[in-house]
Amino acid sequence: VQLVESGGGLVQPGGSLTLSCAGSGFTFRPYYMSWVRQAPGKGLEWVSSISPGGASRYYGTSVAGRFTISKTSAGNTLYLQMNSLKPEDTAVYYCAADRRLRCDGGYCTVLRSDFNYWGQGTQVTVSS
């Protein structure tokens, strides 16, 4: 089982990035797929989740209206479209899978042990 994130990098404030997460060894179908981030010196902050069928999407307060989570209908790829990026979005972004919805809004912190599967992360740096 593997989750591999890609698409991170350096971007100026106000810019956009799209992160991808490719899964192998299991199917996304029964899982809530999520993005979680960790800023330097801070804990794990939940960013967004999408329901197993894809009909429901959930966002943390700090990213709602700027980020969009999606996944391919047939395959095992998760995306996070990030717009209007701010310096405070700088973090390592992880994708994660769990059969339960861990957060459904607001500000929510999580643990790695809250999820069945976890990726290695991709760095996003927002700086001028």
Image (cartoon, rainbow, N blue to C red):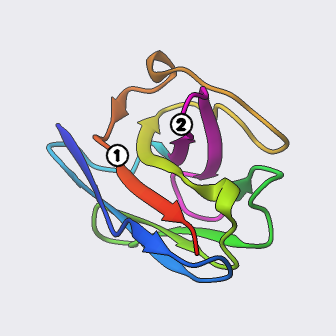
Residue at 45% of width from left, 42% of height from top? 31
User: Residue 112, relative to residue 49: is it above or below?
Assistant: above
- In the picture, residue 110 is in which quadrant? top right
> Toward the viewer: 52 or 104?
104
Please tell me whether mark 1 sits on a helix, a strand or a loop: loop
User: Residue 28, relative to residue 112: is it above or below?
Assistant: below
Label annotation for residue 16 = none
Where is residue 101? Give x, y as percent.
63, 35
Residue at 81% of width from left, 38% of height from top? 107
Which badge, 1 or 2, comes first in the chain's sequence? 2
For disc 2, the neighbor class at 10 Å (few under 14, some 14 to 19, many from 20) is few
User: Residue 126, relative to residue 18: is it above or below?
Assistant: above
Mark 2 belongs to which amino acid?
Pro
Circle 1 is placed at which residue position?
121
Please tell me whether mark 2 sits on a helix, a strand or a loop: loop
Seen in the image, is 91 located left or right of residue 107? left
Q: Which residues are magenta?
A: 34-56
Disc 1 to disc 2, C-alpha distance? 13 Å
- Check if residue 10 falls in the magenta segment: no
Where is residue 6? Give x, y as percent.
29, 63
Circle 2 is placed at which residue position?
40
> Toward the viewer: 66 or 32?
66
User: Residue 97, relative to residue 72: is it above or below?
Assistant: above
